[in-house]
Amino acid sequence: MRLLARIPKPGGEAATHVWWVLRRAAHAIEQNAVRSISALGLGLSEFAVLEVLLNKGPQPVNVIGKKVLLTSGSITAAVDRLESRKLVRRTADTGDLRARIVQLTETGRRLIERAFQQHAMDMEETMAVLRSSERTELVRLLKKVGMWGAARMEGTDDASKS
């Protein structure tokens, strides 16, 4: 099935313009996030790993990597850095001896709880320009376009395997 058949004709902004606006907005927001996180003595990857562990509990390394959009090499390096700072520890996965489970240490938990609180306040300031209803609508639209883009990529991947 060709996905193109279901795309409505644009009546307003050109898709390329929407992409550029989205890209610029995402960059500006990410710069605010990076500044917030680096002020806490963490890199973006390290913060993301700690945040996943704070909210989801102990996780396999590969699962964390998928959640924070890091390759296997990058997630390993991020976990190595966190482990060297005694913020996380790796243990064997009893269900799969090849896998490693990453969990917060007490020091890591204290750091990410404090860091996440500060980061949340910083992001509130960054997003303060939007009313609550606008945030809700933005999230809905970003999920919609993100899911559509992912579906297009899956369709492309499937077609190239044939």
Image: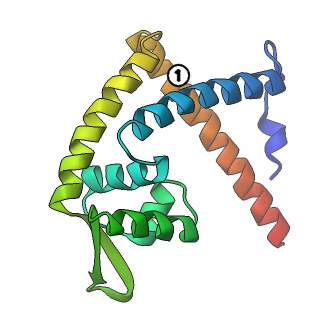
152 left or right, relative to 41? right
Q: Nearer the viewer, residue 43 or 139?
A: 43
Q: Which residue is located at x 43 percent, y 40 percent?
A: 38
Q: Quadrant of residue 106?
A: bottom left
| Residue furthest out toward the bottom | 97
Say how many tags the image has.
Answer: 1
- The percent position of residue 128, horizontal first and vertical second, equals 42, 12
- The percent position of residue 154, horizontal first and vertical second, equals 70, 57
In this view, 128 is above or below 95: above
Q: Which residue is located at x 35 percent, y 32 percent?
A: 119
Amino acid type, residue under disc 1 in the picture: Leu
Q: Which residue is located at x 47 percent, y 13 percent?
A: 134
Q: Quadrant of residue 13?
A: top right
50 left or right, relative to 141? left
Q: Quadrant of residue 162?
A: bottom right
Dot 1 corresponds to which residue? 138
How packed mark 1 is, by other alpha carbons closer than 10 Å (few <14, some 14-19, many 20 or more), is: few
- The percent position of residue 81, horizontal first and vertical second, equals 41, 64
Q: Nearer the viewer, residue 132 or 55?
A: 55
- The percent position of residue 80, horizontal first and vertical second, equals 41, 70
In this view, 97 is above or below 6: below
Badge 1 marks a residue whose secondary structure is helix
136 left or right, relative to 71? left
Q: Which residue is located at x 41 percent, y 38 percent?
A: 37
